[in-house]
Image (cartoon, helix red, strand yellow):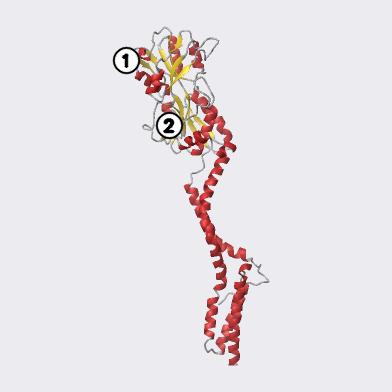
């Protein structure tokens, strides 16, 4: 039996658009949400708001620069946690350990490469950190090979200074079997050299550090001139030849008293593979602020750089060195720039997928609205077909009653104005069939 139409006196009339469109739009909305969920799943998650960096000795240059990075990143909404370590070797082990929580680290060049640590990538080289070779002034040595058989301090176990010292001494055939190579921290090396327990101390420190200034001012200690520095640099590309100019430390006291050629590794930043590309850009911005200026060994703008890096340089780093920071990060805070980047990345493929969907929705909507009208024609055609036959009065009355109910139902249907002609056509056809049945009924009377 046909359902009764809504009572106009008690029921609020529902506009056609709000009544019909949700039924049509719901599948499209669900499909769009499903596409959105898939895109969010496949697009990289937002960069974390915390980075852990392995630095080094809290009194050293690595720790100093880590604090400068920390101050740079704080206003950008990224927390930089500094992990103090014993130096390069420990930093590499922490990076290679997925459970350590360390994301990036300061690493001295020449200590390791991707063959030993395939899971690491290079971010940048930062500055020259020369190997200072101090000797007793009364020690008669001209070349590094003359250190054979002497007492040589080579730095603390696990430090980059020790690795560089061993590499340089090894070039001259000096090893533990023919020379007393003593591992100790910087403080003990300085005290040992002063007290005469060491003939030579090999250490890495900033030129303006207290330790270097102290040793350069000692009357019985002098900085050794590495005459073959250029040869060592050419034999080992991770080393560079640098020169400490005459009087560069203190012109008034004439320190040093002549040009001193030195061999220098380079401080680099290394990260674990998978480190978020957006954070690489932020780290490089902090590094640019900290290391782009000139100093005794570096020219202005020489660092940060992709040179001297032992590990494969990250793609985002290469892009940074070629084009500078990402466009949005030049003008917006880091969190805002990365949010917009992700929205753009999300919107483009979503728009591509929704464009064909938008072309499908209008025909589906038209079919949906018209189906509310056309669904009645099946019953109307059946009544009309039966009316062609000879019918008793009782059947004709039943058909007329069915048409009355059908008309009531059709009158209750609400459609957009653009589809009103379909509704009126249906009512006309109902009236046409009713007229024919009424004429049959008159003939039977």
| The one of 225 and 210 positioned closer to us in this rendering | 225
Check the image and report above or below for 206 versus 150. below
The residue positioned 45% from the left and 11% from the top of the image is 222
Q: Secondary structure at mark 2?
A: helix
Going by the picture, which residue comes out furthest to the left? 177
Write down the quadrant of residue 398 in the picture: bottom right
Q: Residues within 10 Å of mark 2 (few under 14, many from 20)?
A: many
Is the residue 219 above or below the residue 52 in the image? above
The residue that label 2 is drawn on is: 94
Residue 5 in view in this figure: no
Question: Which residue corresponds to the image point at 45% horizontal and 10% vertical from the top-left?
Answer: 221
Image check: 136 left or right of 209?
left
The N terminus, quarter of image = bottom right
Measured from the top left, where is residue 318 in percent x and y?
A: 47, 35
Image quadrant containing the C terminus? bottom right
Q: CA distance from mark 1 to mark 2?
A: 33 Å
At which x and y percent is residue 201?
Answer: 42, 15
Position of residue 80 measured from the top left corner of the image (x, y, whole percent)? 52, 33
> In the rendered image, which residue does mark 1 sit on?
178
């Amino acid at each position: 039996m046909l359902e009764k139409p809504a009572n106009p006196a008690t029921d609020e009339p529902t506009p056609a658009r709000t009544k019909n469109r949700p039924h049509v739009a719901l599948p499209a909305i669900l499909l769009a949400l499903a596409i959105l969920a898939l895109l969010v799943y496949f697009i990289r998650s937002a960069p974390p708001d915390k980075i852990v960096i392995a630095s080094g000795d809290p009194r050293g240059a690595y720790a100093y620069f880590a604090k400068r990075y920390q101050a740079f990143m704080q206003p950008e909404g990224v927390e930089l946690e500094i992990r103090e370590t014993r130096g390069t070797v420990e930093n590499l082990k922490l990076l290679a350990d997925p459970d350590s929580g360390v994301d990036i680290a300061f690493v001295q060049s020449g200590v390791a490469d991707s063959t030993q640590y395939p899971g690491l990538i290079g971010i940048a080289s930062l500055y020259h950190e020369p190997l200072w070779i101090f000797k007793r002034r009364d020690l008669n040595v001209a070349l590094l090979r003359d250190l054979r058989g002497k007492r040589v301090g080579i730095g603390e176990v696990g430090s980059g200074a020790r690795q560089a010292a061993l590499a340089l001494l090894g070039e001259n055939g000096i090893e533990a079997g023919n020379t007393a190579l003593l591992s100790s921290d910087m403080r003990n090396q300085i005290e040992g050299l002063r007290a005469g327990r060491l003939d030579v101390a090999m250490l890495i420190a900033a030129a303006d550090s207290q330790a270097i200034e102290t040793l350069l001012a000692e009357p019985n200690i002098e900085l050794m001139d590495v005459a073959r520095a250029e040869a060592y640099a050419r034999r080992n590309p991770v080393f560079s030849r640098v020169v400490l100019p005459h009087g560069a430390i203190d012109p008034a006291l004439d320190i040093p008293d002549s040009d001193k050629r030195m061999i220098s590794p380079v401080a680099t930043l290394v990260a674990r593979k998978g480190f978020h590309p957006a954070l690489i850009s932020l780290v490089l911005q902090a590094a640019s602020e900290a290391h782009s200026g000139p100093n005794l060994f570096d020219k202005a703008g020489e660092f940060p750089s992709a040179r001297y890096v032992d590990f494969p340089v990250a793609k985002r780093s290469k892009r940074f060195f070629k084009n500078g920071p990402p466009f949005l990060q030049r003008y917006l805070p880091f969190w805002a720039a990365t949010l917009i980047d992700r929205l753009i990345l999300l919107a483009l493929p979503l728009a591509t997928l929704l464009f064909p969907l938008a072309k499908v929705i209008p025909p589906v909507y038209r079919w949906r609205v018209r189906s509310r009208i056309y669904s009645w024609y099946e019953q109307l055609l059946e009544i009309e077909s039966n009316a062609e036959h000879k019918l008793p009065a009782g059947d004709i009355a039943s058909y007329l009653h069915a048409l009355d109910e059908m008309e009531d139902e059709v009158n209750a249907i609400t459609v957009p104005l653009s589809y009103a002609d379909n509704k009126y056509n249906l009512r006309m056809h109902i009236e046409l069939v009713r007229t024919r049945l009424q004429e049959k009924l008159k003939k039977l009377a």
